Amino acid sequence: MLANQGNFPAIVKLNVGGQHFTTSLQTLARDPTSMLAAMFSGRHEVQTTEDGSFFIDRDGTYFRFILNYLRDGELILPEGATFLAELEAEARFYQVQGILNELRTIKASNVFEESVILRNEEHRRVLKDCLPLAGEWRLLFRASRDGFAASIFHSKCDHKGPTITVVKSGGSIFGGFTENPWKSQGGYIPCKKAFLFTPSQPVSSGTGQNASYSSDETVCNEM
């Protein structure tokens, strides 16, 4: 059954992929550029179920975060939330730009979140504070996942801009930062901002030469 959207009740029942939610029409229209505002604007028809709920053919697992953001204007997530990518996909579907902006900020603050080597939050914070560049970082290469061949490393890491390489050898963790992109050609490239580090104390390299190919993880800065 389809409903004429000019006749929505003040309190709206939603069925999102089988999960039921109740909210106000005012909340759904809170972000005028969102898909939900468009759905309930009266310009379109919306499918309803037998109980009168408006049906959205979408997984409802993270819909409560979308709805709560529209209610409060603030994205509140549980501590250590591991579903940021899934929530981002939902926010893109519903076209809620405010959530996308907040997720970008969260991701930028959670540098090295994908690292299986740098697990200590204090170590991550210290290294982040030493970085000369701001922006969003993403995992490019993990040797234990992608393979240890130099050719694989270069296929994933060449020409990607500034990088951080993190290495774990036995019980030791170390690595380096360079602002110059990796290249497959041999030789050395001078870097003015490069440094070497251990998790407890980043140390300036002085010469600023690139690290070796024996890295386990490389993270790239997207400017």
Image (tube, rainbow, N blue to C red):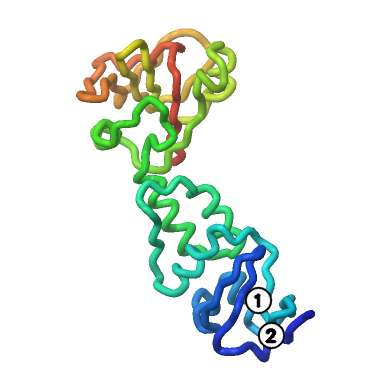
Disc 1 is placed on an element classified as: helix
In the shown orientation, is residue 201 left or right of residue 38?
A: left
Disc 2 is placed on an element classified as: helix
Tell which of 134 and 100 is nearer to you. Answer: 100
Q: Which residue is mark 1?
A: 39
**Residue 91, above or below 70:** above
* Label 2: few (<14), some (14–19) or many (≥20) C-alpha neighbours in 10 Å: some
* Residue 56, picture quadrant: bottom right
State the CA–CA distance, disc 1 to disc 2. Answer: 8 Å
Q: Which residue is mark 2?
A: 5
* Residue 37, picture quadrant: bottom right
Look at 65% across and 76% down and name the residue there. 39
Look at 54% across and 22% down and name the residue there. 145
Q: Quadrant of the N terminus?
A: bottom right
**Residue 53, above or below 88:** below
Q: Quadrant of the C terminus?
A: top left
The three-letter code of the residue at mark 2 reads Gln
Residue at the limit of the structure toward the top, as seen here: 187
The three-letter code of the residue at mark 1 reads Met
Q: Residue 100 at x, y = what percent?
A: 48, 57
* Residue 41, picture quadrant: bottom right
Tell which of 52 and 138 is nearer to you. Answer: 52
